[in-house]
Image: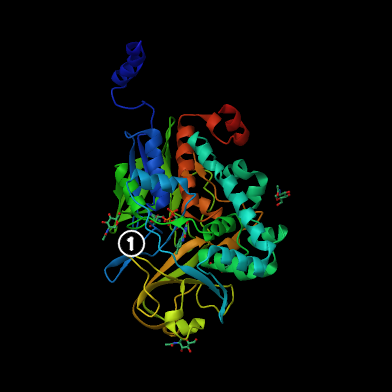
Amino acid sequence: MALILLLPAVLYQLCAGQPGPPDSPGRIAVVGAGIGGSAVTYFLHQQFGPQVQIDVYEAERVGGRLATLTVNSQLYESGSPSIHSLNLHMQDFVKLLGLKHRREVPGRSAIFNGEQLVLEETDWYLLNLFRLWWHYGISFLRLQMWVEEVMEKFMRVYKYQAHEYAFSSIEGLLRSLGGEHFVNMTHKSVAESLQGIGVSQRFIDDVISAVLKASYGQSVSIPALVGAMSLAGAQGNMWAVEGGNKLVCSGLLKLTKSNVIHARVTAVSLHSTEKKHLYEVQYERDGTLGSDYYDLVIIAAPMHKATFQMSFLNFQPPLAELARSYHRVVTSIVHGYLNASYFGFTDPKLFPFASVFSTDSPEAIFHSLESLCPVNVSAGFRRKPPQEAGVWRVLSSRPLDRKELKTLFKSYYSVQVIEWQAFPNYSTVSPSKSLPPVLLHDGLYYLSGAEWAASSVEMIAVAAKNVALLAFNRWFELSEKIDQQDLMHRLKTEL
Ligand SMILES: Cc1cc2nc3c(=O)[nH]c(=O)nc-3n(C[C@H](O)[C@H](O)[C@H](O)COP(=O)(O)OP(=O)(O)OC[C@H]3O[C@@H](n4cnc5c(N)ncnc54)[C@H](O)[C@@H]3O)c2cc1C
Ligand SMILES: *[C@@H]1O[C@H](CO)[C@@H](O)[C@H](O)[C@H]1NC(C)=O
Ligand SMILES: *[C@@H]1O[C@H](CO)[C@@H](O)[C@H](O)[C@H]1NC(C)=O
Ligand SMILES: *[C@@H]1O[C@H](CO)[C@@H](O)[C@H](O)[C@H]1NC(C)=O
Ligand SMILES: *[C@@H]1O[C@H](CO)[C@@H](O)[C@H](O)[C@H]1NC(C)=O
């Protein structure tokens, strides 16, 4: 019996002449090697099998906005510092690659309004709750329930994806998770949504605005969905990868044995024959031009209005304009002595905070200021007391000038500045404008548009799996696995 069962597989291998199903795509290109590009490479490899060659084009650094820099011969996160614990894909990657969670070093936060600290976290959780309760009453509970509800619905995506369901638009994916209400949350503001459930204006101005400013450099007018995700992060449960978050990207690319090409893609052009579409990827490497042909192309680089210069050629009708406005965030990594008196502490020894967030006031010169731990935290590690020189990360909307640095720091050894096209400029969002498309052409996909629903490592990893499943399901015409809307109900009855 076992022999008979085995036979078709053996025959199939012999007849095909080459390993793998005969009609798999031959070659796939991925543009961008941030977490989006690396994750989609891994998921494509998983779906189509190891025989499909994947070329990954990266113009700058593997990791993208997951990045590190060196201060005093130690590495620190300079891009996205932390990952939410509900991000199941990232958790899987870390396990798969044999990486570790970085040891947590506790630290307290405070909120600063430009003149004084308006809210201070204490060591004692119950006391914190009590203070929030005292200050803001029922608003705090309402907020928690709201965030939990959003996250609970969002978590459904992992189940749908485990069953290989894919969506050809971000709206479709969101609708399947939380109905039309979820889609509306991508253009209705956080402030409006929270007012709608009875959260007080004072709580929104003092607390919510500070958290959102620190997370996205933007105000409480950003959409509710991205706001809810970032507020979920503010409740704790954040983690980071020991050795640097970007190790996940390089690890996945290595694991899949994909071919990383250090080149900037300048154009994708369509070449159609009667039988199929081929996509030519044109690129520039060290001033020389090259090109190559692919069956599938995934764009995993956000299209910035200011800097993205990739063209799409020979598409009839031409592809819609994809570039949108992004919001700049400047990271300054400062090695020096904090000026505690700026925050009202004349004795620096008494300054107890590891991070300070600014409320959304025009006087605030920074969004957030945080004492950093290196990406490798040894067992005996302790945070530097504030009277000693430490490494601080300051986020701001523009580079800090010398005077501002001299206000925040008594003195410093070094300042390293990185300007990020960090997040979508959410003030360009409107109800009449849909989210960026996922499917650009038969074999051409755009992954990074998912950031317009929520800019986070979590959202991008989910979008990466969706694109890989969509490409696979479309390639093998598994239409029953695409754009299904009643999955909640169906998966319950199927299982
Ligand atoms: C300062 C900062 C703090 C953040 N904090 C958090 C946080 O706490 N939690 C969280 O979840 N998220 C956070 N984020 C957001 C998070 O970093 C991003 O959502 C995520 O890393 C995006 O990954 P990506 O792969 O889509 O894009 P990217 O990481 O931007 O990767 C795109 C890659 O494509 C490459 N590329 C671009 N154009 C081309 C081309 N023409 N040819 C070839 N390659 C090209 C780029 O060089 C880049 O490496 C933060 C971001 C910043 C900047
Ligand atoms: C979503 O928004 C539209 C208008 O933008 C509105 O008509 C509709 O009732 C909203 N639906 C839900 C469920 O919130
Ligand atoms: C930091 O951690 C990573 C991952 O665990 C490890 O590979 C690397 O060797 C460590 N580096 C140092 C300097 O300890
Ligand atoms: C974001 O968009 C708004 C509205 O279009 C615009 O006024 C603002 O200048 C943009 N910000 C950035 C940083 O591009
Ligand atoms: C520190 O902050 C105080 C209060 O804002 C300010 O007067 C002082 O000039 C700042 N700089 C130094 C070096 O103390």
For disc 1, the neighbor class at 10 Å (few under 14, some 14 to 19, many from 20) is some
- Quadrant assignment for ligand 4: bottom right
**Whether the residue under disc 1 has CB within 8 Å of ligand 3:** no
Residue 95: image location, x then y, percent: 36, 45
> Is residue 253 in view from this perspective?
yes
> Is residue 314 in view from this perspective?
no
Residue 73: image location, x then y, percent: 26, 68
> For the N terminus, which image quadrant?
top left
Query: Which residue is drawn at the image coordinates 54% and 78% (left, top)?
Result: 364
Q: Nearer the viewer, residue 388 or 112?
A: 388
Q: Is residue 249 left or right of residue 234?
A: left
Q: Based on the displayed image, in which of its 4 quarters is residue 117 positioned? A: bottom right
Residue 180: image location, x then y, percent: 67, 45
Q: Based on the displayed image, in which of its 4 quarters is residue 172 positioned? A: top right
Q: Nearer the viewer, residue 22 or 373?
A: 373
Q: Is residue 158 left or right of residue 488?
A: left
Label 1 belongs to which residue?
377
Residue 101: image location, x then y, percent: 38, 53
Q: Nearer the viewer, residue 436 or 1?
A: 1
